[in-house]
Amino acid sequence: MSEDLILQTHGLTKEFKGFAAVQNVDLRVKRGNIHALIGPNGAGKTTVFNLLTKFLQPTAGTIQFNGIDITREEPAQIARRGVVRSFQISATFPHLSVMENVRVALQRKVGTSFHFWSPQSTLDVLNDRAVELLESVDLGAYIDTQTVELPYGRKRALEIATTLALEPELMLLDEPTQGMGHEDVDLVVELIRKVSKGRTILMVEHNLSVVETLSNVITVLQRGSILAEGTYDVVSKDPRVLEAYVGVEA
């Protein structure tokens, strides 16, 4: 039986004025896995994410999601298909409450994003689902808190909740633990593990301890190309990966 692939790229390439930021990347993400994309700075990880979510158009190659060619689709089309991305920089509304942030995301899903003339009470139908999402990421005690007052790790948890509000089939997490202390890292790792049940996650992550803890499969990029792929035990012992990270031959 062939692998059940949710996302697959063939020869994915992105050039900027002759410089290949991503070159001939063949990525195979299996349904239900947590798949990590790692590599040294400048390896092309974020460019790959931008290509997958169509913030950039590829110079060459194809992208398939659930067997459908989505190479030329727009970002909104990709999101409607169930590919939803978080960003390195916090993407919450700081002066809305935690509940209001999730309701904004839920409005997008039910198609009322631009009903500015509707009374506030019409959004109350979203409350039960918003509370459910917040409790799923351990934010039930912060429902009425203004987002700007949340600790950094809790803001990341809120971003995960707003991502879940769009009912993603594939979640793309861009540096979910960037800039966190150990306590917040542990919190977010457990949240990712929790929300991964029943969905697929592709994440870019620098913290190799997080990668080791969460990932089923790891793809290592260097200079825009795939250097190695496999489990953490396999790639962490690969001399080419050690050289890429340490800068000397292993």
Image (cartoon, rainbow, N blue to C red):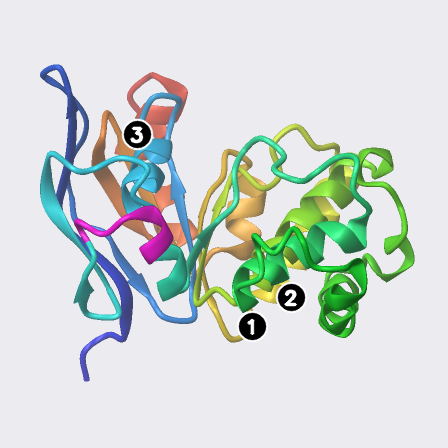
Give percent across and percent down for residue 125.
74, 73
Give percent across and percent down for residue 122.
74, 67
* Mark before the other along the chain sequence, 3 or 1: 3
Check residue 119 for magenta coloring.
no
Q: Which amino acid type is marked by label 1?
A: Lys
Q: Is residue 196 left or right of residue 202?
A: right
Q: Nearer the viewer, residue 231 or 72?
A: 72
Label 3 CA crowd tier, 10 Å (few <14, some 14–19, many 20+):
many
Marks 3 & 2, CB-CB < 8 Å contact:
no
Q: Which mark is residue 44?
A: 3
Q: Which amino acid type is marked by label 3?
A: Gly
The residue sitting at 26% across, 70% down in the picture is: 66
Q: Is residue 14 visible?
A: yes
Give percent across and percent down for residue 121.
81, 65
Check disc 2 and report its element: helix, strand or loop: helix
Check residue 75 for magenta coloring.
yes
Give percent across and percent down for residue 185.
70, 42
The N terminus, quarter of image? bottom left
Marks 1 & 2, CB-CB < 8 Å contact:
yes
Q: Is residue 231 left or right of residue 224?
A: right
Q: Is residue 82 above or below residue 13?
A: below
Check disc 3 and report its element: helix, strand or loop: loop
| Alpha carbons under labels 3 and 2: distance apart | 28 Å
Q: Which mark is residue 194?
A: 2
| Alpha carbons under labels 3 and 1: distance apart | 28 Å
The residue at which mark 1 appears reads as 197
Q: Which amino acid type is marked by label 2?
A: Lys
**Residue range highlighted in magenta:** 71-77
